[in-house]
Image (cartoon, helix red, strand yellow):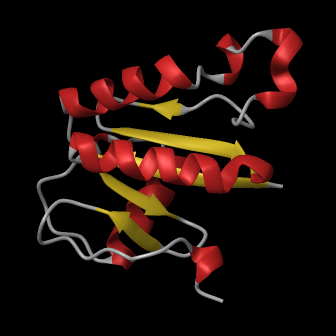
Amino acid sequence: MSFDLGVFYTEKTHSDEEATKRYVAYCEAEDLTPFIEPSEKVASFLKELTSQYPQIDDWPEEDLDNCPWSIAFDVSEGHILMPMVFSKAEEMYSVIVALAKKHGLVCVDPQSGRIVTASPGIRKAERPWWKFW
């Protein structure tokens, strides 16, 4: 089982539903042009995250059981989708949310359909989906 989070840059206000639709478009759309707002913030986020937690293809093979990622990230100049193993979800959720806040990115949890961190004016959830029960 895996758990996914996505981060993206935007200057537009998004509801939970709009952010989730954008996440789905990153997963499914052939032409991402309408959904990508390029920003150096995305590259800075990725650099900082992977300095602590390298992508699965860069993780030492002898230590692969400790890798939090289930597959490689989906990355553009304006977004990153991060699929992770469920056993590491709570730990990585905290790391990703903190980094998204630091870099001024929207973080969306597609499992709950909620924004979990965002710039001022963008609605966000206060806790991960597994803490809503």
In this rendering, position of residue 20 left or right of residue 74: left
Question: Which corner quadrant holds the N terminus?
Answer: bottom right
Picture layout, residue 63 above or below residue 28: above
Residue 125 placement: quadrant: bottom left
* Residue at 64% from the left image edge and 28% from the top image edge: 72
Picture layout, residue 53 above or below residue 84: above
* Residue at 46% from the left image edge and 29% from the top image edge: 49
Residue 28 visible at all? no
In this rendering, position of residue 92 left or right of residue 59: left
- Residue 32: x and y, percent? 37, 42
Residue 94 visible at all? yes
* Residue at 25% from the left image edge and 61% from the top image edge: 118
Judge by depth and name the residue closer to the eye, 91 or 19: 91
Residue lying at the far bottom of the rendered structure: 133
Picture layout, residue 115 above or below residue 96: below
Picture layout, residue 19 above or below residue 42: below
- Residue 119: x and y, percent? 17, 59
Question: Which corner quadrant holds the C terminus?
Answer: bottom right
Give the total of numbered labels. Answer: 0
- Residue 38: x and y, percent? 21, 33
Residue 19 placement: quadrant: bottom left
* Residue at 31% from the left image edge and 24% from the top image edge: 43
- Residue 99: x and y, percent? 36, 42
